[in-house]
Amino acid sequence: MEALKDIMLRVAGVIEESIVDGPGLRFVLFLQGCRTHCKGCQNPQTWDFNGGTLVSAEDVLARIQGDPLVHGITFSGGEPFEQAQALLPLAAELKRRGYHLMAFSGYTFEQLLPKPGCRELLSLLDLLVDGPFIEEEKSLELRFRGSRNQRILNLAASREAGWTPVLDALNGSIER
Ligand code: SF4
């Protein structure tokens, strides 16, 4: 496998400590580039595939490791699965180190499965929030989600079910 120092990720930004992008205290990596272009997207500056900054996977890992309070990593965007193959070695290393891994995608679980590198990346993750943001289904009450069509999938259970989507218990939780 390619060394992390040789793998460049196109990154829109990071949040080093977040409590709103998944369970617990999390490091959030926003990947640059998205072709879904949802109406009402909060981050249209992340759409341009030539935007953002190139950062090595090794540098991302070092930043994550610099904070002993963080136990979860969230890949967000932009569309993280557009860089699925580049993310694989970093995700594998994070999993090996025991981090809880979650991703957001504008694609549904079913749409992701045949895309290059995506099933492999989903094999390493714990949770997936899937589907585009749909303004007409927007709700401020949903935990970790922007619109009602989006699902929080338990990926271990989904894999065990033969790669069919299984909702996580968090799917029913609401913001208070
Ligand atoms: S998938 Fe996410 S980043 Fe892409 S347009 Fe939709 S809300 Fe914005």
Image: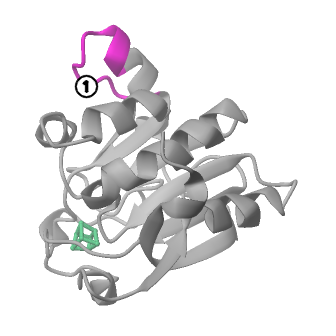
Give the percent coordinates (x, y) of residue 47.
24, 81
Closer to us: 35 or 130: 35
In depth, the one of 173 and 45 nearer the eye is 45
Relative to 77, does residue 176 appear above or below in the rendering? above
Start and end of the magenta stretch?
Answer: 158-168
151 horizontally vs 149: left or right:
right
Type of amino acid under label 1: Pro
Q: Kindly identify the residue that appears in the image at 40 percent across and 86 percent down.
A: 52
Q: Which residue is mark 1?
A: 165
Choose between 115 and 45: the one closer to the eye: 115
Q: Is residue 118 left or right of residue 64?
A: left
Which quarter holds ligand 1?
bottom left
Classify residue 41 by image quadrant. bottom left
Residue 9 x/y as whole percent = 44, 68
Magenta segment's dominant SS is: loop
The C terminus lies in which quarter of the figure? Answer: bottom right
Identify the coloring. Answer: one colour
**Mark 1: few/some/many CA within 10 Å (<14, 14-19, 20+):** many
Placement of 129 over or under 168, stated as above or below: below
